[in-house]
Image (cartoon, helix red, strand yellow):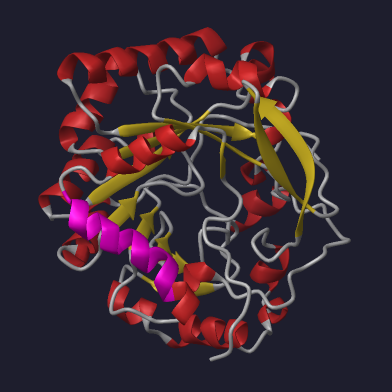
Amino acid sequence: MNGGYIPINKGNYDMDTDERIEQFEFNRAEGWEEDYRKYRENWSKYPRQQYVSDYPILVDIELSSLCNLKCPMCYTITEEFKKKVCTQLMDTKLFQKLADEMAGKVSAVRLSLRGEATLHPDFISCIRYCKDKGIREVSFLTNSAKLNREYFIQAAEAGADWITISIDGVGKQYEDIRKPLKFEDTLKKIKDIYSIKKKNKWNKPVIKVQGIWPAIRDNPSEYYNTFAPYVDLVAFNPLIDYLDKDEDIVYDEDFICPQLYQRLVIGSDGKALLCSNDEEGNYILGDANNESIYDIWHGERMNRARKLHAMGSFKEMEVCRKCYLPRATQDDERAFVNGREIIIKNYINRNQTIGK
């Protein structure tokens, strides 16, 4: 296979100091240090070598495609998404089937994708089930609506390793985007989580706060200083074309997607999506209700996608043409956080206005 531009972890950028990033990684590795080192090495190595392992390194399992918010920049509010995706909760028996197969074979599970995972009534027991099966890292993304003191303690005691909380801006900016959530309520949850971890001397779950850049741009130091004392990591993402409005797209023409060698994504209905950016399920790899993870991972549909990318023909796939990963970026914006310069890698011809 030929070489190419294979971006690892593109689109999510730290606002933090090197020391705090190092500590975040140290805490993530707690309890499986050597295997964690190999896991992170393979996360980069497998895509760059275009190596297909027996099982994916990580499996995204969408416990819920339902969401309790309607953020203006989110694809879930579009008519196209509503027409194509039947929002629902994953059947718990299907989830257990997936976890049973992953035991001893898959290092990490992410219990989120398009919706709010904590809406699933068996969410806590699903975390515990994964940990009982020996999954080394269980993570999830949340808007924190349900993440009060009691719920956090349940998630932590069930074995959650990493929680990413989406917080777009502070004060009124946050409330305008994340309706009907209130900023002070969310900040209190962050502080409560911090106090619980400190009291119990818990390094995990590590807590990461992230927001979209346009909601932070006016005062990144204020955003960082609001959360950094209480969480393990603060990050941001440039706004991507979730609403499918961009036309004049500039690509990195030699792009090869890393996700095809890293992770498999199972939607709430059991359908396996091409990747975590196939929000509308436009390229279905298989059906986990009646196929194994192994068979989907090595199946004809996934191998076709890998071959097209290896040939430099990723644009033949609609999902990939619309994805932000192959989009070219420019280092055209600088910002300062407490005097530290950070570089914003904006996508060329991508409007950074919320809702556009």
- Region of the chain picked out in magenta, as a range: 32-46
Task: Measuring from the top left, give residue 255's x and y in whole percent.
Answer: 65, 74
Does residue 181 appear in this view? no
- Whether the magenta-drawn stretch holds residue 280 is answered as no
Give the residue displayed 73% in from the left and 28% down from the top: 217
- Whether the magenta-drawn stretch holds residue 42 is answered as yes
Q: Considering only vertical position in the picture, is 195 above or below 71?
A: above
Task: Measuring from the top left, give residue 126's x and y in whole percent.
Answer: 23, 44
Tally of marks: 0
Q: Compare residues 330 and 18 and report the one nearer the observer.
A: 18
Q: Considering only vertical position in the picture, is 34 above or below 316?
A: above
Drawn side of residue 160 relative to residue 79, left or right: left
Task: Measuring from the top left, give residue 112's x and y in whole percent.
Answer: 42, 46
Give the residue displayed 44% in from the left and 66% down from the top: 44
Drawn side of residue 340 relative to residue 148, left or right: right
Q: Pick the quarter of the image with the C terminus.
A: top right
Q: Compare residues 237 and 186 and report the one nearer the observer.
A: 237
Q: Give the image quarter of residue 194.
A: top left
Give the residue displayed 41% in from the left and 32% down from the top: 20
User: Of all residues shown, which one is farthest toward the left?
Assistant: 132
Does residue 53 appear in this view? yes
Task: Measuring from the top left, give residue 15's x and y in whole percent.
Answer: 57, 33
Drawn side of residue 172 relative to residue 40, left or right: right
Q: Considering only vertical position in the picture, is 18 above or below 274?
A: above
Drawn side of residue 100 relative to residue 251, left or right: left
SS majority, magenta: helix
Give the residue displayed 62% in from the left and 44% down from the top: 76
User: Of all residues shown, which one is farthest toward the right?
Assistant: 248
Q: Considering only vertical position in the picture, is 56 above or below 70?
A: below
